[in-house]
Image (tube, rainbow, N blue to C red):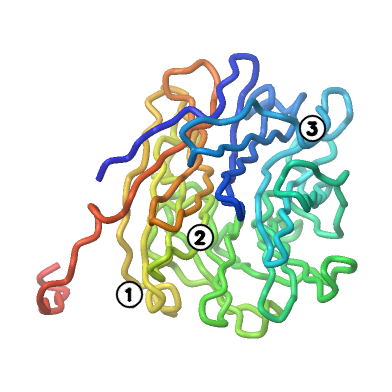
Amino acid sequence: MEIKQYTINRDAAYYQAWPDLCRLEDDRLLCVFSECTHHGNRSYTRIMLTESSDRGRTWSPKRPLTEGTAGLGYFYNNARLAVLPDGVVYVTVDRIYGMSEDHSEARIVLYASRDGGRTWNEGLETPARGIVPDKLLQLPSGRRLLACHYQDPESGKLVERLWYSDDTGHSWRGPVIVGRSPELNLCEASILNVDGTLVAFMRENSFAGRPCYKTFSTDDGLTWSEPVPFPLPGCHRPTSGFLLDGRIMITHRFMQGGKLQWGVCQNLFCGLADRNSVLARTYGEAVTRIIAIDHDSSPVSDTGYSGWAQFPDGEIYVVNYLVDRAEKAFIRGYSFFLDSFSVEKTEEKPELSVATR
């Protein structure tokens, strides 16, 4: 499978990371990302936007969504993009007060654009408390969900929570626990509505190479199941969505585990699954296929937070950040079709037994 690469934005003055992407009604691509001093130094941050009118081959000069935060006592972290059914584009981003990722001092802020990302409101601070928000999600009932995670002060574990609104964001209720376990650090959820069942794909953050975990809700997000593993090994920052053919694609960082240090985050993968596998309640019932999209060759590699969109002809465009051969991280794009990867089923195959696997 041929994967073409494009430089979306590279600036020697800043560390640029944690992008997301959406396709607008006029087929423009809109990309949001963070610029900062460094992943490990947030003394300056700013959320930036860029767009493409030629399917990601070229990109506009970056422009700011937020203020720069040098000297302000807070910083912006990870932004997400969503286009709701009414055509309004939303950015969700965590604003963290203090200069560390203190989850108790993190607020989720919503920015809205009613003209396809050209102009934006000043941003609304929501009641949601936590970091690394999911995209704003609207359900068929009209309910809106806003998820993020925090560190539980009693257990010390990361817990995924959400707030919900039944009046288009004028008021919010929560928090609701989406993912919690005494043995797991569950975070960075990507929630997908699969035939009326909500599935929350989550990162497990023990740096032990554990797979993605998922929970389920059948009541529009009010209650959630216990977490079960899903066969995306070493999955960090999952980004889920539907392909045109009905399958689910999940881009994610592959984090193999081991000693935590700069350079261990090296690969961007994407996983493919059908609805039955996504809705399966056990690990052994789920089937995935995994594609390697890119490898960060830098000795201080840092990569794997991503977003993606698909065009009507089937072409997929992915955004990611990495260091590679640059001095500081930058934003890269990828375009590909899945045709050359998919294998047509030509005959029934016998099911493998444990002895023959």
Q: Which amino acid does label 1 sit on?
A: Gly
Q: Mark 3 points at which residue?
A: 99
In the image, which disc is placed on residue 252? none
**How many numbered marks does the figure carry?**
3
Q: Name the residue under label 1.
A: 284
Depth order, front residue of 323/213: 323
Q: Is mark 1 on a helix, strand or loop?
A: helix
Of callouts 2 and 3, the N-terminal one: 3
Q: Is mark 3 on a helix, strand or loop?
A: loop
Asked if the residue at tag 3 contacts the one at tag 1, i.e. Cβ–Cβ closer than 8 Å, the answer is no
Q: Where is residue 153 in the image (x, y as percent from the top left)?
A: 76, 56
Depth order, front residue of 131/333: 333
Depth order, front residue of 328/24: 24
Among the 4 quarters of the image, the one containing residue 73: top right
Depth order, front residue of 54/18: 54
In the image, which disc is placed on residue 240? 2
Q: What residue type is labelled 3?
A: Met
Which-is-in-front pick, marks 2 and 3?
Answer: 2
Which-is-in-front pick, marks 1 and 2?
Answer: 2
Quadrant the N terminus occupies:
top left
Residue at position x 18%, y 67% in the image: 344
Crowdedness near tag 1: few (<14), some (14–19) or many (≥20) residues, C-alpha within 10 Å: few
On screen, residue 78 above or below 153? above
Residue at position x 80%, y 35% in the image: 66
Of callouts 1 and 2, the N-terminal one: 2
Q: Is mark 2 on a helix, strand or loop?
A: strand
